[in-house]
Amino acid sequence: MGQTRHGPGRIAATAALALAALIMAAPLLWTLLLSLKSNAELLRGTGTAFAPPYTLQNYADIFGHSAVFGWLLNSAIVSLGVTFGVLALSSLAGYGFARLRFPGRDVIFILVLFGLAIPEQSVIIARHQMFSALSLHNTYGGLIFPGLAAPFGVFLMTQYFRAMPKELEEAAWLDGASRFRTFWKILLPLSLPAQATLGIFTFLATWNDYWWPLISATNSDMYTLTVGVASSQMNFAQTNGLGFLMAQAVFASVPILIVYVIFQRYIVAGVSRAAA
Amino acid sequence: MSGLALRNVSKRFGDTPVLDDVSLEIGADELLVVLGPSGCGKSTLLRAIAGLETIDEGQILIDGVRVDRLAPGKRGVAMVFQSYALYPHMSVRENMAFGLINIGTARAEIDRRIAQAAKMLEMEHLLGRRPSELSGGQRQRVAIGRAIVKEPKVFMFDEPLSNLDAALRSRTRQEIAGLHRRIRTAMIFVTHDQTEAMSLADRIVVMNQRRIEQIGTPLEIYASPATEFVATFVGSPAMNILPVAQATADGAFLRVALGDGTQLETSLPASAIKDGALRLGLRPEAVRLCAPGAGDTNATVEFVEFLGDKTHVHLALSRGDRVVALAAAPCTARPGDETGLVLDAAAGHLFGSDGRNLKAAPA
C-alpha cells in the first residue's frame, strides 16, 4: 500500500498534474498579480509585478466606478433569468418528450435536436433584425430570450426523465396524484442532479457570453459585465490603466468562482454525465 | 357484489392481444394468486385493474361499481410493485403520507394511520429513514405499509418477492399471509413462482397465453389440473407426460397402452374414451421404483437428485420417454441401474389433443 502511495510513478503523476495545474492557473495568477499593482508602476513594465509594493487601489477604484455595479446587476439578472428559464422550459419539454404520447412527438424531438447543430453565427443577423423590429434591444428581454432556446437542455432532461423508473410515476398515480403533481413532487425533485448540471453550465455560459450582449446592449446602462469590462479597454490598457483593467477582470470572475466552489460536485458529475 | 369482478376483459397492444376475454371474481376478503409464465398477461391483468393500462373490452367492477374508466387513484386500489417504487427523495413517513395528502386526509388521521401501519409491520424505527438507507426486506415492508395506510378495497402485489433472497422470501410470504388474515381485504398477488402461489392463495388463477386456464384452490389446481399446461406448470418436478399409443374401452375403466406396450388401467370410465391423440399425465409420486420385472415396465436410471428428505430419480423408458419418480431418501438407485417401475395410472390424468384433462369437468 505504501509503495502505491509514494512510488516513483505516483510522484511523477503528481508532478505532471501539478505542472498542468500551474500552466492552467498561470494566466489567472498573472491577472491577479497585475491587479494588485499601481497603474504608474505597470507603465514602466509588467516585470514590476513580481516585486512589492502591492496595492488594493485598483479595487477601490472599481467600487468608486458606479457603472461596474450596474453591469454586475445586469449580468446577474440575465444569467439567472436565462438559467431559471432554461431549467423550467427544458424540464417541462423533457418530461413531455420522455413521458407523454402525442402525434408528431418524435419528429418534433428530432427538430429540437437539429438545434444543436445550428451555429449561433448563422442566425445572428435574423435574430438581430427580429429583436430590432420588436424593440427588444437594450432590454433584459432582449438579452434573456435568445438563451431560452436550449436544445441541449431539452435533450438532457428528456434523456434523464426517460431513464427514471416508470413505476415511480405509476405509484404516484395510484397514490392519487395528478400528472402535474407527479411531475412536480416526484420526478422534478429526482431530476435535481441533471437540473444542477444544466443550471450551472447555462449560468456560466450566459455569464461569460460576450457576443450577443455586445450586439443587443448598445446602451451602456444595459451592458453586461463582459461587455462593460471590454468597453473599458477600447483605447487599450494604458488609457484606463492595466492594473484597473485586471482588477475588473478579477472582480468579474468572482461570481463564477463562487458558483464553482459551491457546485463543483455537480460540475464534475455533469461533465462525467455528458461524457457518458 | 363486494370485492372485485372482471367481465370479459380484453386488451391489445397494437395488433398483439395481451388479455383475451378474461372473467373472474374475487371475494372481498379473498387472497387470489395469479400464476403463470412470463408473458402470459398476468402483470397486464393487474395493471388493468389498477388503471395503469386501459382495457379495450369488458368491465372491471369494485364493490359493484364500474371502475375501468376511472383514474388509478380513484379506484380504491393499492399496489406493491416488484421494484417497490418507493419515492427515493422522501422518508418512509413521507412515502406513506403522500397518497393520503393527495386525497386531502387530515394531518391527525394521516399520523394515526401511519403509526398503526408502522406498528403492524414493526417498522416504527424506520419512519425517518430514506429508502436508500433500508435493506431489501425493509423496503418491501415500507411498500406494503404505503399500501395499507390507504385502506384500499383491493390490494395488489406484482411479484413483490422476486427481489428477495430465499430466506427473506419465505419469511415475507408468511408475513403477507399473516397480514391478509389481520386485515381481511381482497388481495391479488401476481407471481410466476408456484411455491408462492400454493402457500399463499385462497384460490389460484393459472394464466397462459393471455387466457385463464383454470381457477381453483391450490389443492384443486394440483390434484385436478384442467389442462395439460396447468398439470405441467404446477408441481415440482413437473408432471410426467407420456404419449398414449392406444386407448381401449374394455371393462369398466379406460385402459391405455404406452409406446412400449405397457398396459395401464386408468380411473376414467370406459365411456370417457375420446378420438385423437391422448397423453397420460403422472405426478412423480405416482411413479414408484421396484425390482426389475416386478412393476408395470422397466426403465434405466439416468440421474439421481438427492434432496435430503426425498429423492428425485430421473429415468428413461425403453422407447426413450423420460419420467421422474419420487423416492424416499435414502435411495439406492444409481445412474445406469435397471429398475422396475409401478405407474399408478389410476392416480394419473389423461389429456386430449386439445390439452384438456378428460377427468376434469367441462370448462
Image (cartoon, rainbow, N blue to C red):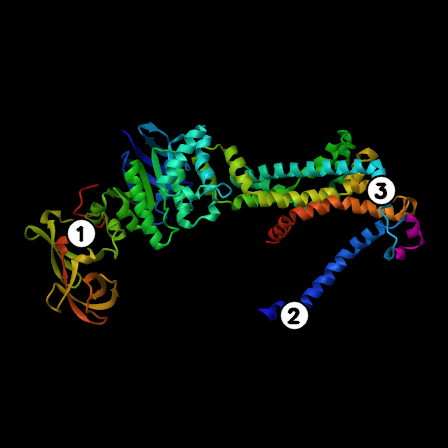
Disc 2 marks which residue? A9
Q: Is residue B303 left or right of residue B141?
A: left
How packed mark 3 is, by other alpha carbons closer than 10 Å (few <14, some 14-19, many 20 or more), is few
Residues in magenta? A39-48
Asked whether residue A45 is drawn in magenta, I would say yes
Percent position (x, y) of residue B191?
33, 47
Amino acid, disc 3: Ala
Mark 3–mark 2 distance (CA, rounded to whole Å): 47 Å
Q: Which mark lies nearer to you, 2 or 1?
A: 2
Residue type for callout 1: Leu
Crowd class of label 1 (few under 14; some 14 to 19; many from 20; radius 10 Å):
many
Instruction: Please state if B283 lies on the left or on the right of B107 as rendered.
Output: left
- Which residue is rendered at x = 59% and y = 45% of the image? A194
Which chain does the residue under circle 1 lie in?
Answer: B
* Parent chain of label 2: A
Which circle marks residue B350 in the picture? 1
**At numbered mark 3, what does the secondary structure look like: helix, strand or loop?**
helix
Is disc 3 in the same subunit as disc 2?
A: yes
